[in-house]
Amino acid sequence: MVSEPNGRRLLLVLLVGVTVGAVLGPSVNALPGFSDHTGPSEMRVTSFERLDAGCEEQVGNAVHSSTGGGGYSRTAFIRTADTDANLSVQVRRTSPAGADLSVFHVDVDSHHDGPANTSCETGVVYRVALEPHGGSDEGLVPDAHGTEVLWFNDGELVGCSASLTSPLESTCDGVGRDEPRRVWANGTGG
């Protein structure tokens, strides 16, 4: 039979051992309740549609991106040799597997046969929607994680969307823009 002081000593040694093992072990994320949350492991195209086509002066201003409901979407104009050009979309992950920040490139490319239009700069307005899949789940104590989507038209970087937690930083600031950086805020007075 173990006396009470020896039992307390044994319990103390076990607690110290577990604590040291957790600190010196591979990661605090291995402990129950902690997280090694990562961004998604893949991004799938859920829709890709052609909305309009014509001269850039008439249809080229329809550009916007949105993030919400777990997905990403972008409506944009791509210059093409003619209004009948075919479009294709491909998504590829460029960050390493298991990274906290999952980075994806969305490539929209135009393909055309025949003579090019010479009366104006022509193009196509399209909309693409993406849905993330995979990645690790949040634990009780989540860590930094996020997603960044870089948008390309015929190999040219034209935009960036991001959703992330601190302390991760996005490279989206100013991507695809020649104009100065702007900060937007909404607020209510009291």
Image: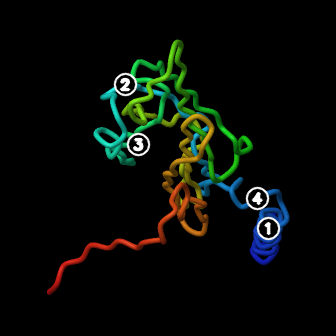
Q: Nearer the viewer, mark 4 or mark 1?
A: 4
Q: Quadrant of the C terminus?
A: bottom left
Mark 4–mark 3 Cα distance, whole angstroms, equals 28 Å
Instruction: Provide residue 175's location: percent of width, then percent of height.
Output: 55, 58
Q: Quadrant of the N terminus?
A: bottom right
How crowded is the residue under tag 3: few (<14 C-alpha within 10 Å), some, or many (20+)? few
Amino acid marked by disc 4: Ser
Mark 2–mark 1 Cα distance, whole angstroms, equals 52 Å
Mark 1 lies on a secondary structure that is helix
Instruction: Provide residue 79's location: percent of width, then percent of height.
Output: 47, 35
Mark 2–mark 4 Cα distance, whole angstroms, equals 45 Å
User: Residue 23 shows which numbered tag?
Assistant: 1
**Which of the marked residues, 2 or 3, is nearer the chain's N terminus?**
2
Q: Which residue is mark 4?
A: 27
Q: Which residue is mark 2?
A: 49
User: Residue 70 shows which numbered tag?
Assistant: 3
Amino acid marked by disc 2: Glu
Q: Looking at the image, do the residues carrying marks 4 and 3 touch, with CB atoms under 8 Å apart?
A: no
Q: Nearer the viewer, mark 4 or mark 3?
A: 3
Q: Residue farthest to the bottom?
A: 190
